[in-house]
Every structure is written in structure tokens, then in C-alpha cells.
Amino acid sequence: MIRVLIVDDQELVRAGFRALLDSDPDITVVGEASDGDEAVELTEDVDVVLMDIRMPRMSGIEATRRIRRQPDPPEVLVLTTFDTDENAFEALEAGAAGFLVKDTPPVQLLEAVKSAAAGGAFISPATTRRLIDHLIAAGRKNTVPSLPPTFGSLTERELEVLRLIAQGFSNRDIAERLSIAELTAKTHVSRLLTKLGVESRVQAAVLAHTAGLMD
């Protein structure tokens, strides 16, 4: 059972998401929060957080950043009515596992929650590429993650795992592609993120594109 925390300052929006998520037998809503400050305090025993961006007291971006810095943090899916590259990049930079607009089709939202819970990143490589291109075109190269010194020491297997992460594959998908156990795939991903010094799979995917691995 995937345990979800819904974070949005509008009660009606939270009720709508709860009704949708509770309709899936594999998902249960374990809590709600009306702002980012409250959300940071309610992440214990949570697998996935659905996070709004614009809220009082603390924004969803800052809440995501703080949640992802916690020990063994839940995955965060950022939801917003503002479909802009700026919001998307800030969310991913904060450690979000995905970026969705609030009019995302219900089926896709459920898929995103399940993908995040399974260690996947619900954002297409094309979107990641578009974000990088947009930032470079805007003259903001300094905000695009630079390659860490450890990048050159990645093994062939680690580079292979990184490419699969950049294609949006979950741990289970990676395990099937490489003919290894899912736990082994999870270990590879965890070590890779640590080696790259990033907090999420999407940040790793951005590095993969920055390094030209997906060209």
C-alpha cells in the first residue's frame, strides 16, 4: 500500500485528490497539510507527498527541499496550476521526483504516484532537455548543475544505470533491463545519487543530459 500525504492550501482541492487516490486499491491517503510548514512535520511513515507550490507560510518548493533533506525521505510530486519551466526547474532542483500540472488526467496522476513510490521519476527526458535548453537560452548557465568531480570515476555499470534513470525507468524497470534483483538496482541507484551528490533521480537525469550521455 502506497501511503500519500496531500499538501495544498485549498480544502476543496485536497478533497478532490483524496477521493481520486483513495479510489485506487494500491494507494491510501494518510494525511493532509494546508501549507509547506505543516507538511514538513507530517512526513513520517509517508511514501509519496503531493505538493502544491504556492502556499502561505512556506512554499512547496522550500518544503520539498526540507523534506528531501530528511533521513530516508518520501518522494515528492509537485503539483501546480502554473506550468512554467521556472517552476519545474525549481521543483526538480529541490529534489522533487516529478512535476505535474493540476489538470493532469486522473489516470496519469495515479501512475505518477505509483512510479514515484517505486523509485521512478515522472518526467520525460524531453522535458528535462527542454528545461536545460531554456536555462541556457536565458543566459542562466550557472543554474544548470555542473558535473561533480566524481562523475569521471563512474563505472560502466553506473553509467548504464544513470542512462536508464534519465530515460525515466523505475528501480524495477532497471532491474529487468539489467537482469539483476530489484534490491540490487535500488542499491546501485542509491550509491549513484550519493556519488553524484544529488538528492533525486531527476537531478541525476539532468546531469546525464548535461554530460551528453543522452545525445
Image: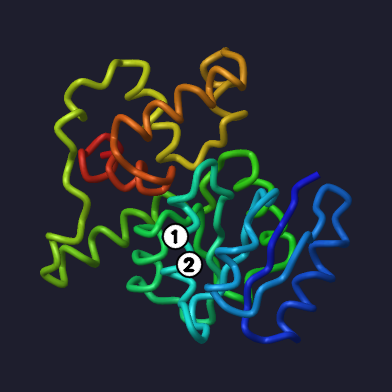
69 vs 85, left or right, is: right
At horizontal 16% and vertical 47% (from top left) the residue drawn is 146
| Outermost residue, front side | 41
| Dot 2: element | helix
At horizontal 75% and vertical 86% (from top left) the residue drawn is 12
The quarter of the displayed image where residue 196 is located? top left
Position of the C terminus, as image quadrant, is top left
Q: Residues within 10 Å of mark 2 (few under 14, many from 20)?
A: many
User: Quick one: 59 or 44, which is closer to the camera?
Assistant: 44
5 vs 120, left or right, is: right
Position of the N terminus, as image quadrant, is top right
Kindly identify the amino acid type of the residue bearing the numbered disc 2: Ala
User: Quick one: 132 or 71, which is closer to the camera?
Assistant: 71
Give percent across and percent down for residue 72.
Answer: 54, 41
187 vs 118, left or right, is: left
Task: Report which residue position mark 2 lands on.
Answer: 63
Q: Is residue 199 above or below residue 80?
A: above
- Residues marked 1 and 2 touching at CB (< 8 Å): yes
Q: Residues within 10 Å of mark 1 (few under 14, many from 20)?
A: some
Give percent across and percent down for residue 167.
Answer: 44, 40
Residue 21's disc number: none
Kindly identify the amino acid type of the residue bearing the numbered disc 1: Arg
At horizontal 36% and vertical 43% (from top left) the residue drawn is 205
At horizontal 30% and vertical 38% (from top left) the residue drawn is 214
User: Quick one: 209 or 15, which is closer to the camera?
Assistant: 15
Task: Report which residue position mark 1 lands on.
Answer: 66
Q: Is residue 77 above or below residue 181?
A: below
Colour scheme in use: rainbow
Q: What is the total number of numbered labels drawn onto the structure image?
A: 2
